[in-house]
Image (spheres, grey):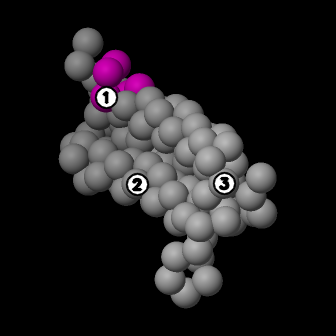
Amino acid sequence: MRWLALSLAGPGIWAVGFAGVYALHGAGCALDWPETALAAGLDLHRAALWAGWLATLAAGAFLLTRLPTADDKGLTRQLPRAGAWIGLAATLFTLLHVAVATSC
């Protein structure tokens, strides 16, 4: 049963990150974070979105480093790794536009 939890960990990290980044987007728009300037022309809203996206990517990459290698031919070794790669790719492509597109 542990392999099932490990197989769902990658998509689970993506789901939590997806909800978190979109929650930051909504909160930032409601609280006027784009009007709060930080260093180097970056506003608070953009910095929060980038931080959430990068933290989710880092969590997915960390998961990949902790899983056993897929050298074994058994499904119980390959499926968790495939799930982690799917979660990482989903995080990269579904949250990238939120982090780089214009806000609010």
Element under disc 3: loop
Which badge, 1 or 2, is on the more N-terminal residue? 1
Q: Residue at x 67, y 43 (%)?
A: 30
Q: Position of residue 97 (x, y in %)?
A: 71, 57
The answer to whether 40 appears left or right of 12 in the picture is: right
The alpha-carbon separation of the residues under discs 3 and 1 comes to 39 Å
Element under disc 2: helix
The answer to whether 100 appears left or right of 70 in the picture is: right
Q: Which residue is mark 1?
A: 6
Asked if residue 36 is among those painted magenta in the image, a careful observer would answer: no
Disc 1: CA contacts within 10 A as few (<14), some (14-19) or many (>=20): many
Q: Nearer the viewer, residue 80 or 27?
A: 27
Q: Which mark is residue 95?
A: none
Disc 2: CA contacts within 10 A as few (<14), some (14-19) or many (>=20): some
Q: Residue at x 32, y 21 (%)?
A: 5
Q: Which residue is mark 2?
A: 55
Q: Which residues are magenta?
A: 4-8
Q: Amino acid at mark 1?
A: Leu
Q: Quadrant of residue 13?
A: top left
Element under disc 1: helix
The answer to whether 83 appears left or right of 67 in the picture is: right
Which badge, 3 or 1, is on the more N-terminal residue? 1
Q: Quadrant of residue 72?
A: top left
Q: Residue at x 59, y 67 (%)?
A: 36
The alpha-carbon separation of the residues under discs 2 and 3 comes to 23 Å
Q: Position of residue 50 (x, y in %)?
A: 53, 62
Q: Residue at x 51, y 58 (%)?
A: 48
Which badge, 2 or 3, is on the more N-terminal residue? 3
The alpha-carbon separation of the residues under discs 1 and 2 comes to 19 Å
Q: Which residue is mark 3?
A: 32
Q: Nearer the viewer, residue 82 or 94?
A: 94
Q: Position of residue 62 (x, y in %)?
A: 29, 52
